[in-house]
Amino acid sequence: MPFIYKDIDLEVLEDYVDIEVQFVETSSLKPVHVIKNSKPLEKLNQNYKAIFIGSAGMGKSTFFRYATLSILNNKYPYFLAALKKQIPIFISLKAVPNFGKSPILRTLLEDTSFLRHDGIKKLSSLTAKSKVFFLLDGYDEISFTTSNNHIRYELGLLLSTTMDVDVDEDCIDTKYLQIYKNITRCNVWLSTREEFYRLNPIGIKASSMKESSTRPFSKDFIAVQLRGLGDNRLVLVKKIFDKYRSRSKRFAELLDEEVFIEEIDTHQDEEMVRLSKRPLFLTILCYIHVNHLLENDEKTFAVLPYLNELVLECIKVLLSDLDKFKVREYSAEQKKLAFVKRRSNYLYEKTEFLKYFAFELLLSGENIFNVNSLTKYVRVFFEKHLSNDNTLAIMAELDQPRSNNPTFVMQLILSGVFVVVNANPDNLLYDFPHRRFKEVLATEALKNPHMFDYFISKIKSRNLSEFVLIVFKYYKERQDDIMKSLFDGWDNDEDQLYSSQLIVNIINQNPTFKIDNYILRYLRDVIDANSYNKIYTELVLKSKDNFYAIKSLILDNIERYIIEGSLHSVNTILELGEFVNPNFLQTQLGQFREKYLSLEIQITLKKFELKSFIHQGTFIDIAHNQEHDEIFFIALSSITDVSLNDSFYISFFESLKLNQIISFWYLLFINNKNFSGKRKSSVFDIYQLVFTAFLNSQTATGFIDFTTKTLLTDLKSFRRILDSKDEKTDIEKLKLLEKEVEGLEIIIEKVKTISDSEWQDAKYLHFKYSKSRFEYLKDRLDFYKFYNVETID
């Protein structure tokens, strides 16, 4: 339930309010058109696995708790109808340590009393019968404590409906393998924020999906986006106000849910209206509204203009509230301690510490803490960051705590600012009520210039990915510093890709921000330094106003760097040329065909020339009318493009001699080109058979005899099927078979006409390629040079 109901504990089952949902594609997260009906979550009964995506405060955790408690109380709403007799296991991922092998299952087995004895055996038995329903809450709140994201890898297994034989044994404990296999047929739900999921996608394999990441639905896998309360805001507010009205006639006179909603909707801050559709923030507004009424004794409510002020006001209310009914989930002794000393003491110091503490938690990636770690942060704060008349008293209480005098730390805990995230009385773990509270408080901390500079120095930390978006929007006067730091100082390709995606997210949320000059400056620096560029194409496309500037950048630099042989600079320039106009690029490349250039540059120029032909759809026609040299084959084999499918290569192969096909095939193999299909399912797989036969052959005659015999047998079989067709035969299968017959005839003719010298040349090249393969994988250019020197004319 929303944490803020400290004094009016809503019962989740009775007081739960439905939220609006829509289905999205599992990769792009784009909405999927689904016919609206009164039961939008019906599809959950048809899928084993589901990912629930929503923004902060959208009700993801509440929805998971509602589902869990419904099953435990034998109450099954329509979307849980298929889960009767299931055992729900709710796991808060922020409480799972992100290190060691199998962190989720390990934590479950260690922290669940039922599973502490023979846990593996019990869990294996339950999952084998598909009796367990896992609800994994808060993927966006996991920590990044090591370079390996063990939780993300394990989630990939838990959400998959099929499992490979091999798993990463650095991340997974093999003694749990059978449990993972069993869980492929168990129901598993995961909740996460959208922005976090985009930056940290999970590798999921679904048995009924060719590519699980590109389809919205399958038999086993589904993605759901939570969109907020929608028209149900009034329902939630009424439930909250009814709790107060039942306690006092005064509340009955003052509280009016319709007036309250109208005040919000007529407010000038559109973000406030939008956030009111999130259960968490609407609940906070209700709570502040009630306190406002108590202070002013009137119905009107001035909605706070900014989100930060809203959260800070909520923190202030929690820290200074003296009502004994507002301390929840604590023992009688703890409650008694809360009133020995007023919780409104040290209000300024507590507020400043919470800002600092939230900032430090985000930077470190810590999501939970206990009393000891909280105490350490308090000591550091008052020793290094804040010193005033109260500091000595606060530190003295920490040094000599007394049972009748709660310390600064205990006052914070009893105020309700933190919530308990585990049920182990020996080591209670706490967190802020919601990540959004940490983000707002940390944003306030950055008003200190030294803290902001420290934030800039850590801006590429994965833990800060979502926080950066908030800071960028809030501190408009520091946007230039943020953007410069994201563009500068990339240590590796991974950092470059991550920063590029983060910049794209920033621009998507701030469409009026002018990104053009930053991109242009970055591109100039990369070209001048001959540095490797792996910037997101999407980011360059954001720079629409830079079209002519980029065109000028190409014209000013292309000849110089091509002649100099600056490979990375040329690559960047040519990539920009593709962005500007492929025809423009082709015109520029034409002037260098006759000049002496290094082999690396020749290959690069040829690669981009071929890409332009491919995008224009003219490649096959050109390929049939040109002689092909080694540079042509190397350049083509290194092109990564979704349009280069089986059909493309089959059409291209028709223009080649068999020894050229074999040589080119090996280049594709070295470049790790993977092709779909099984034996006899396509003409392309027949080429695979020919290539395999070539590798195993000792003489040209033996290769020809074996291959033609095998292919002729297939050809006879295919023709026999065609000849025996009847009215019941599948027309589509017949068309496919006719293509295979046509392809077989072409391949057989190529095999028959290969000469001894052509076979020997291909064999020699293959031998040379094999020797250099490891060098090639280490540095592709070494292979290119080798290829040029060693190839037989």
Image (cartoon, rainbow, N blue to C red):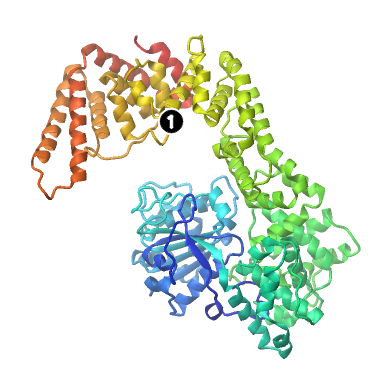
Quadrant in the picture for residue 383: bottom right
Would you place residue 43 above or below residue 473 in this image? below
The structure residue drawn at horizontal position 43% and vertical position 54%, both measured from the top left corner, is: 157
Residue in the foreground of this view, choosing between 484 and 692? 484
Would you place residue 721 above or below residue 75 in this image? above
Q: Is 26 on the left-hand or right-hand side of 409?
A: left
Q: Secondary structure at mark 1?
A: helix
The structure residue drawn at horizontal position 42% and vertical position 59%, both measured from the top left corner, is: 222
Q: Is 46 on the left-hand or right-hand side of 600?
A: left
Quarter of the image where the C terminus is located? top left
Q: Amino acid at mark 1?
A: His
Residue in the foreground of this view, choosing between 581 and 192? 581
Quadrant in the picture for residue 530: top right
The structure residue drawn at horizontal position 63% and vertical position 50%, both measured from the top left corner, is: 509
Q: Which residue in the structure is indicated by mark 1?
A: 615
The structure residue drawn at horizontal position 23% and vertical position 32%, both measured from the top left corner, is: 686
| Residue 741 coordinates in the image, percent (x, y) | 17, 33
Would you place residue 111 above or below residue 491 in this image? below
Res. 703 in view: no
In the current view of this chain or complex, which residue is farthest to the right?
389
Res. 335 in view: yes
Q: Is 735 on the left-hand or right-hand side of 573?
A: left
